[in-house]
Image (cartoon, helix red, strand yellow):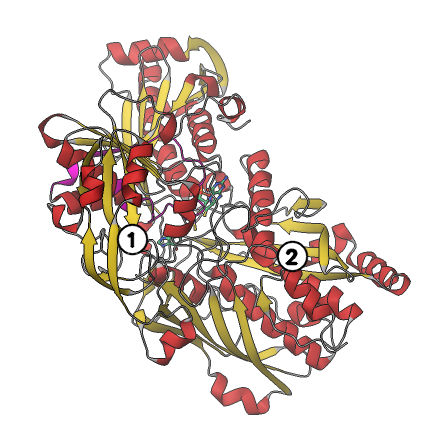
Amino acid sequence: MKNIDAKSHLRGESIYVDDIPVREGTLYAAVFGSPMAHGLIKKLDLDAARAMDGVHGVLTACDIPGVNQIGGIVEDELLLADHELHYIGMPVAIVVAESEGIAKRAVAAIRIEIDELPVVVDPRQAHGVQDYLTAPRTFAIGDPAEVWSECSRVVSGRADIGGQEHVYLETQGTYVFPLESGNLKIHTSTQAPTHVQRMVARVLGTAMHRIEVDVIRIGGGFGGKEDQATPWACMATLAAHILNRPVKLILSRADDIRMTGKRHPYSFDFRIGLDRDHKIRAYEVDCFQNGGAAADLSPAIMERSLFHGSGSYYLPNAKITVYSCRTNLPPNTAFRGFGAPQAMFVLEAAIFKAAEELGVAPEVIQRANLLQDGDLFPYGQQAEGCRAVTCWEELEQTHGMEPLKEEVALFNRENSLRKKGYALFPLCFGISFTNTMLNQGRALVHVYTDGSVTVTTGVIEMGQGVNTKILQVAARTLGVSPGRIRVESTNTTRVANSSPTAASTGADLNGNATLLACRAIVGRLQRVAAQELGCSDTPERISFCDERVFIDAMPTAFTWFELISRAYARRVSLSEHAHYATPEIYFDKEKEKGHPFAYHVYGTVITTVTVDCVRGTYEIDAMRVVHDFGSSMNPDLDLGQIEGGIAQGVGLMTIEELLVNEQGRLVYDSLSSYKVPDIYSVPKLVDIVPLDSEPSPHAVFGSKAVGEPPLCYGISVYFALVRAMREFNPQFSLQLSAPMTHQKCLLSLYENL
Ligand code: MTE
Ligand code: HPA
Ligand code: MOS
């Protein structure tokens, strides 16, 4: 089944926040952000802005009727600065005017005097003075301290991974309408409508039931709108509430890049100990997470780093510690993978460095330590239905790993200025919010008297195609054609208390809720049909397929439409609101042990690259993947998710560089200097082979979550590049610092040559 949005996307007819027809009386907001990364406000002069023609208001912290606090996990983030400024772009004042142009000119007329304070941008510096956003946490299994001396080789080092800008196509934005009696309706580009509703209510000092948040779809989120759509929605709503006018606030790309948080850069100190048979005996890592100026989702991201610190391997003795460090940068936030790619990168870096020192190929160590059924993760969950070895072996078979390696070796013998390298990467990604509470979904299904159906869930469509999957679930369960069903906008009044669409759980949580709702309706309709067909005592003989009633799997003359009419006439409910909570999961934060994930997703990639050793540029020849989809309910969508994830992972490891100077200012702050992968920088070939695997019982229809895990395949690109570069220059010092930009590549190629 095709993505239900494909046609309207292609024709440019899909509606995003800025496409909602403008209502009469609409005002436009723009935000004045701090020009300095750290300091105290000495004087804020708003007079010139206020005096401008067409300006209706300039709002600051003192205009907030409720609480000036939007911290979700830790209450440490103001909506508007009141005294201290913590990062460049930190919102200070909201200008509301008759046009966007006037609002922006008024923002430019605001003057601020600041007593500057020292700026910290390096998480290690914050760690030095123990300035943390939340208490450090450690996951441990066995005891590395006891086995270092028994290892045949111990290797230690430092690794670094940079952040990443989300570059969702639709920037952050909100359009809000005041309704009667102080109620408000908010259209906003968020992954978390309930979070917006809760925070708006807090900021306005009102009840959540007065706030309706509606989302048709968003133009990409990638985690960047899990928490950070909220402040902009709060600011627009504050203005609408105070001025009693519709208010629109859409960030320009420049403001969005400058003012919002990004993927967390991490710095690591690692130590790894191996046996003579290449088994990893011990691993220890300190992770310094660059959290930015407020906690935002950093504590949850820290947690996912801990959960993925052992990657796809069994580590008998490991100690993984994360320090969430406070710096003067915009609060860093969720980004596809949510702390897992960083933790996986450092483990691969440790294995890579150990391999170099032992003089073996890294895949020898990787293969020797792959996770197997029954192995314990450091957090106490046992690997079940583990596909790590199966994926690896399947890759060896279907893609012929040996011929590929020979091809690379031959190329390198025949070419002196261009070199090829390859690398493998085994993926293991836990599916469920690590915060058990969030693993719940809801769906509201109505069957109308003409037999057509609407479904509302708590899930947000952000391009991943989840609404198409929801529709498939409803169509299959009700036995009606997909064209008969419409997936409604996500709306807090129709479906309340939704979790963010995140952690790749959107389809599982809301798809399973849809399944439950449809099953309840089917149950009632079976009884109606049984009565109509004279088998009231055995309604289980009835089923629905192709818009027809079946008895004992044989079609009857009774259609879906007649059935619905009969059910209505018999005063049987044609609507259902269902709730789904992932069973069996729990986690004990005291012991740091439990069973946090419903299941794991596995896969293996082999990547080949070619480096131009004169220019320091490179191309990715191919990424060949064996991926565990369970039994995919929509292979087209799932392949699209893998390809998109890979492109984003490639960017993270190659050309996307978030450089911040000592003043806390982004150096590459526009899309002309911050480069995301284009058609030339993605792999020339992406070949994805689905693994024939058991459908997972907690995945909806056995179709495993696919949103985030594939991004991690990008990690292989970094190591493939280093190996190609080593072919040209075996002498350069191994920095283990991602991304490997063309600049870094060129400098390494000629270091110590
Ligand atoms: N795909 C598209 N096209 N756009 C997005 O914003 N976000 C990713 C992933 N794939 C994203 C995407 C992230 S970060 C997550 S958590 C999942 O989709 C969320 O959707 P799901 O739970 O339905 O997989
Ligand atoms: N993953 C993604 N987003 C989240 C999570 C998680 O585990 N927890 C809270 N938000
Ligand atoms: Mo995705 S980072 O969990 O929104």
Toward which corner of the image does residue 458 lie, by quadrant? top left
Looking at the rendered image, the quarter that the C terminus falls into is bottom right
| Above or below: residue 48 compared with residue 662 | above
Residue 155 horizontal/vertical position (percent): 60, 83
- Residue 390's disc number: 2
Q: Is residue 698 left or right of residue 271?
A: left
| Above or below: residue 109 compared with residue 268 | above
In the image, residue 314 lies in the stretch drawn in magenta: no
| Above or below: residue 51 compared with residue 33 | above
In the image, residue 230 lies in the stretch drawn in magenta: yes
Mark 2: secondary structure? helix
- Mark 2 to mark 1 CA distance (whole Å): 32 Å
Give amino acid for label 1: Met
- Residue 437's disc number: 1
Q: Nearer the viewer, residue 305 or 522?
A: 305
Mark 1, other Cα within 10 Å: few <14 / some 14–19 / many ≥20: few
Residue 414 horizontal/vertical position (percent): 90, 61
Provide the residue span drawn in magenta: 206-234
- The answer to whether residue 596 of the structure is visible from this angle is yes
